[in-house]
Image: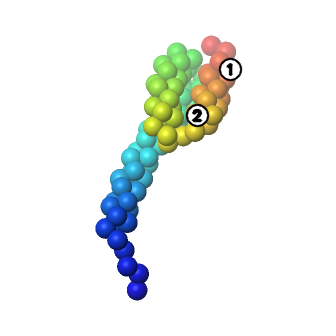
Amino acid sequence: MWLISNQQRREFKLLLVRTERNKSIRSKVKTAIKKVDSAVAANDKKLAQENLKNAIVEITKAASKGVYHKNNASRKVARLSKAVDSINA
């Protein structure tokens, strides 16, 4: 039988809290990206640009909180920007 110290119990609780926080932040980023993608698919440049601004904010927040690596966040922003710029409307 394993003995678990009080410190290990506290760390495990913190792990659960951090995991939930990260899931929430990742979900917000994914939702923002989906909004941009749907606007791009509909060829709605104005809506896509508005959604892109919001997506960039969410992605940057996630990167600053350590949920995403800064290069990963930068790559996401670049790909979204490229998609929005490709709309010919």
Q: Which mark is residue 42?
A: none
- Which residue is more in the foreground, 71 or 49? 71
Whole-percent x, y for residue 79 in the image: 65, 29
As shown in the figure, which amino acid type bears the numbered disc 2? Lys
Q: What residue appears at the point 47 percent right and 26 percent down from the top-left corner?
A: 57
The mark that comes first in sequence, 2 or 1, is 2
Quadrant where the N terminus is found in the figure = bottom left
Residue 5 showing in the rendered view: yes
Whole-percent x, y for residue 21 in the image: 39, 47
User: Which quarter of the figure has residue 13?
Assistant: bottom left
Say which element carries label 1: loop
Left or right: where 18 falls relative to 56? left
Q: What residue appears at the point 34 percent right and 64 percent down from the top-left corner?
A: 7
Query: In the orientation shown, which residue stands out farthest toward the top?
Result: 89
Dot 2: within a 10 Å radius of its alpha carbon, few (fewer than 14), some, or many (20 or more) residues?
Answer: some
C-alpha gap between disc 2 and disc 1: 24 Å
Q: Which residue is mark 2?
A: 70
Q: Which residue is mark 1?
A: 86
Whole-percent x, y for residue 46 in the image: 52, 15
- Which residue is more in the foreground, 88 or 85? 85
Query: In the orientation shown, which residue stands out farthest toward the bottom?
Result: 1
- Which residue is more in the foreground, 7 or 22? 7
